Amino acid sequence: IKVRRTRNQRSQSSLFLLPLLFLGSVLIGLAADKISNLFTSNFGSGIRAGRSSDSGIAQRPPACTEEQRSKVLQQLTPDKCTWDTSKPWYQRCSFTQATKQSDSTWLKSYYEALHKKNGSTSTSNESNDKFVAVFVGCNMGYDAVDALRMGSADGKYNKDAWAEEIEDMIGEYSNNPLSDRSEFPLDDSSSSNDHNDAIVYCIDHSTALTASFRNAAFNLGWSNNFHVIDGAVSNIDGLKYFLKSTVEANERHDRAYDEKCRSMKEESQDAFEKNCLSVRSAPLDVYLEEEARKGQDGNERIHLLRINSDGYDYDILMGAKKTLSVTEYLEFQYNWMNSWEDYKLIDAVKMLDDLGFTCYFGGNGNAWRIDESCWLDHYDWHSWANVACVNRLLNKHVAGNLEETFIKTLDNKEVKF
């Protein structure tokens, strides 16, 4: 027996089901949103998304117009870039000259405003998560010290105190001039209650440097905030070889030295041990995961990642995908040496864009966006440049500052390189 319902009965049943369907869709949406939040707030074990009140998603900047591209071409001219294709160490290319002085004003202004906004009534760390900075290649450590100062708003972190502790090392490495002694500005009236929790990781292959940094941090009482990691950083886990003479002189590392040591090891173990050093090399993701397992919170939100690696920047970025997913702001260097010989800058820009970053040539208070819509042909020439990238998914304020700097730079008719 088949029971046939009338059209009216079917309509009444449908009307009865509509509220249930609506309620179900709401519950599913809430569940999906919860899952999404869990996914975006965590990366592996022990990771927390910090400074949630200061975070936020920024939209991808609009594509460069032809007028903007024309202005960039007038400011970053291609002529001298093509002159130096066989001798890039002359560093006459326009984007090299434009970014020689990396001052990161767009980042510093964000933290200045953040500290002033919160004043003495609360810390800038409203999510109770510490400021974290990571330096791959630390030079003399001055930038790392200033990062602690910027993130903590604590005047005890200053370059003069650091210089006094490492002055013997500065004398030994006489070919390394003292870094810029300008510091992140702080309000002199700031009290100890205004200081925020901050930590910096300094990763370097030079054991002489890292030993000196550890001693300096200990003597200054900074050991809990200035962490030193021994090792080279790359995209694979293994060993890298260095000539002792270049390490002792604090010279830049060339992959030809690594190849020379490998050949020496095959021919004579005695010669290898006399002239070469074996240094652990691992991806940045591995080093920071190890710090997390030590209880050092190595995988928290990273507010600043700066890479200075003698031409191995691309390899380091390739081994830092997880780290980059929780990094708000990144700086690295483009040049013609080592792994950059095999890649072009646009390769890194596209990879970082896929991870949510927008990249710019940045220096001396100016910025030029270098995404695919703004890309110019002469950027393919290998020459030194400082590249600043902001994760638009994690910090809309710095993203806004950088894009605003780009617009202002284009409107400045006095800028030309």
Image (spheres, rainbow, N blue to C red):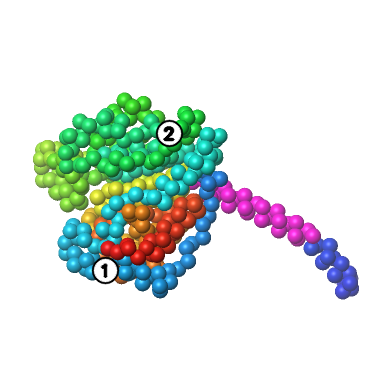
- Say which label, 1 or 2, has the lower sequence index: 1
Quarter-of-image position of residue 69 = bottom left
Inspect the image, locate mark 1, and give the three-letter code of the amino acid beneath it: Pro
Q: Which residue is mark 1?
A: 78
- Asked whether, in this view, residue 31 is left or right of residue 203, the answer is right
The quarter in which the C terminus is drawn is bottom left
- Residue 59 point in image, percent of width and height: 51, 60
Disc 2 crowd, CA 10 A, few/some/many (<14, 14-19, 20+): few
Q: Position of residue 252 (x, y in %)?
A: 20, 47
Q: Is residue 268 above or below residue 188?
A: below
Q: Is residue 169 left or right of residue 395?
A: left
Specify the segment rendered in magenta.
19-45
Frontmost residue, 269 versus 171: 171
Looking at the image, residue 354 lies above or below residue 309: below
Main secondary structure found in the magenta portion: helix
| CA–CA distance in space, label 1 to label 2 | 45 Å
Q: Is residue 384 visible?
A: yes
Residue at 40%, 74% in the rendered image? 66
Residue 123 appears at what percent x and percent y?
Answer: 52, 36
Residue kind at label 2, given as amino acid type: Asp
Q: Nearer the viewer, mark 1 or mark 2?
A: 2
Q: Secondary structure at mark 1?
A: loop
Queried whether the magenta region covers residue 34, the answer comes back as: yes
Question: Is disc 1 surrounded by few (<14), some (14 to 19) or many (20+) residues within 10 Å?
Answer: some
Q: Is residue 339 magenta-colored? A: no
| Pointer 2 residue | 188
Q: Nearer the viewer, residue 364 or 195?
A: 364
Residue 378 position, x and y percent, is: 28, 68
Residue that appears at 87% across and 67% down = 12
